[in-house]
């Protein structure tokens, strides 16, 4: 085979000493071709690097299907665990996945959606970008009835399946726990409130405070990117506060852990002076000292279930889809960062 | 547009009130078509979800090229940082990337390579699986002169570009540092020795010991998966040893940190009783107490440079490629886990 040139059915025919018509018929699954010949042709086509629409169609007919995954960013234990769960189920059913990042931008998400469409993926799994305000860019998939499953960051009422956790309930529960440990002035570090998921975590926190008759003010709310830098800056800000909080609930563990480390380095005791709680059960939660109280986010299971739902839809079963949303079991994990000896 | 049916040039023609021939010519960049008409047709094709070989070709001609990335697993800070660096450069040049995991299996890697080929990626960036023993499965790309750049886990002498760090040198330097801190019995926790990268880290460690006249025995070498579980088990094993090491150098930080935590929980002091060193400069290195001495692996830069090299090759510049390998600057970072007060 000459380098750089596209392989044709004539090249395959020549290498197998059969007619081009036989190759063409094999590639299009023609009934007149024996399965032995077809297999031989497919293998040769595969090896020689033949690619064409009909061959791609044939690959699809063989159910070697490719599914697309679009995530905001592959930079967290959360996302990598979700993807691990997806990969596990996909490989069980003979599917392969390709992954793309929207980099937290709706514009880039649009482009990724189109790239996936043009790559003819059999289905799509999506957690949307921070600034995604609508779902118009998924219309290509909806119109063609190519299934799309959303997970973690989703849209309500889109008619498609969402796989989520109860953000409100977990935030409410963890704030109640901090109150139970004697915290009276609890600060919340939240993510972009345009996203329902972060808004729900804030609402859960707020309702628990109001219910207990505690102060819930703008002064006790910090909104940032929830990354390492944001955690350190939040810690510095808390250290400068005239009236220091005695509890901190951050919307993720990375931010909570770096905030905790900053406060501790300034000489304050955790949990005696300030209790800390995070969200996700990231590995850092058990690395930081004291270990961090957090919400157990079932990320691996989320990946498994989202993928299983997608594959169910591909195989014609739309039973789960009828549900609209799947809410996974989650709950809080209490560790030393919020357990005051006097109350334990 | 009817749902579920492929969009044709006739649909596009109808929606724009122009002839199918004009649509066809626009999609194939025919010279007789004005750029205004072509733009209108391309936009309509895009919106309506038209997909065909010629349209894909056209997209490629517009340089909206897709590049493929194959990694062992997206489960580490290292890999996510490399991908972040790649994404940065790709978007700067108007490329999009799709990512696939080999799950540390050569067989799955083969399949991913073929999926990428069939998706007609313009180039490939690869870090190979743990058990990949040859490069035959990349022949499809080599034959067609589609550029492939390997990073981190590479093959020597494959004629393609490798982007790496000096594993031997860094391991040698960090072991020398431990010896300088008074360690006389240093244990190494290494990865799969079939992979040159881990073998080199072991060799660097061994040569530093031999040079200093220290013991280098099988008893002081543990080979495992370098994950959290392996780190804990290594710690338990060390605790059971009759003659305990006074220094541990692990081939990554995750393993080192969990081993350190296990040893510390048993009542030993770090670095007084045992010094610890890791590899990668993962965020856990600064989360664990005491902070972990490690090798600063320039992962983000590795992603940037690998992507830049690939794009250079795509644009016809093969200057860097002539080099065969790019070795990135790296070096050790000394932190409290190996700094004994008596020597500091």
Image (cartoon, coloured by chain):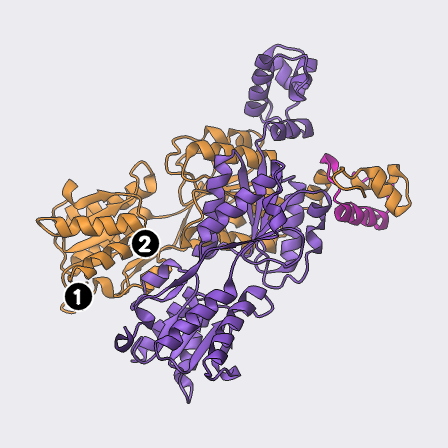
Chain colours: A orange, B purple
Q: Nearer the viewer, residue A300 or B62?
A: B62
Judging by the rendered image, the residue that carries numbered circle 1 is A340
Q: Position of residue B343 (x, y in %)?
A: 29, 76
Rendered residue at 73%/41% (across/down): A58
**Residue occupying the point 53% across, 72% down:** B203
Q: Which residues are magenta?
A: A28-54
Vertical order, B334 against B110 (above or below): below
Q: Left of A205 or right of it: where is A282?
A: right
Which residue shows up at 69% across the image and 53% down it? B137
For disc 2, the marked residue is A254
Question: Between disc 2 and disc 1, whose residue precedes?
Answer: 2
Quadrant for residue A316, please give it: top right
Q: Is residue B308 left or right of residue A8?
A: left
Q: Quadrant of the N terminus of chain B?
A: top right
Q: Nearer the viewer, residue A74 or A266?
A: A266
Q: Position of residue A266 (x, y in %)?
A: 17, 59
Above or below: residue B183 compared with residue B87: below
Which structural element holds mark 2? Answer: helix
Q: Nearer the viewer, residue A281 or A45?
A: A45
Residue A53 inside the magenta-drawn segment: yes
Residue A237 coordinates in the image, percent (x, y):
18, 48
- Label 1 environment density (alpha carbons within 10 Å; few <14, some 14–19, many ≥20): some
Res A217 seen here: no
């Amino acid at each position: 085979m000459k380098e750089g040139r596209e392989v044709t059915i004539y090249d395959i025919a020549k290498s197998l000493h059969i007619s081009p018509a036989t190759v063409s018929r094999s590639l299009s699954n023609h009934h007149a071709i024996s399965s032995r010949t077809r297999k031989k042709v497919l293998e040769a086509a595969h090896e020689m690097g033949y690619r064409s629409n009909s061959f791609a169609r044939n690959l699809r007919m063989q159910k070697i299907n490719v599914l697309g995954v679009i995530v905001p960013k592959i930079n967290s234990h959360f996302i990598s665990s979700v993807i691990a769960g997806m990969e596990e189920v996909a490989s069980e059913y003979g599917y392969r996945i390709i992954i793309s990042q929207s980099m937290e931008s709706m514009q880039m998400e649009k482009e990724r959606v189109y790239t996936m469409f043009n790559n003819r993926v059999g289905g799509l799994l999506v957690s949307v970008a921070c600034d995604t305000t609508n779902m118009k860019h998924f219309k290509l998939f909806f119109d063609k009835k190519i299934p799309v499953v959303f997970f973690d960051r989703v849209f309500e009422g889109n008619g498609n399946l969402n796989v989520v956790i109860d953000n409100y309930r977990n935030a409410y529960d963890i704030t109640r726990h901090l109150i139970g440990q004697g915290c009276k002035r609890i600060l919340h570090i939240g993510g972009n409130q345009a996203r329902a998921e972060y808004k729900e975590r804030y609402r859960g926190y707020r309702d628990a405070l109001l219910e207990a008759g505690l102060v819930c003010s703008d002064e006790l709310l910090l909104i940032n990117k929830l990354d390492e830098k944001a955690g350190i800056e939040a810690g510095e800000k808390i250290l400068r506060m005239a009236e220091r909080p005695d509890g901190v609930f951050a919307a993720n563990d990375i931010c909570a852990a770096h905030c905790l480390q900053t406060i501790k380095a300034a000489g304050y005791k955790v949990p005696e002076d300030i209790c800390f709680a995070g969200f996700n059960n990231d590995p850092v939660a058990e690395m930081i000292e004291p270990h961090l109280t957090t919400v157990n986010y079932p990320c691996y299971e989320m990946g498994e279930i989202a993928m299983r739902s997608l594959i169910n839809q591909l195989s014609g079963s739309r039973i789960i889809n009828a549900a609209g949303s799947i809410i996974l079991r989650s709950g809080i994990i209490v560790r030393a960062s919020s357990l005051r000896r006097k109350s334990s």
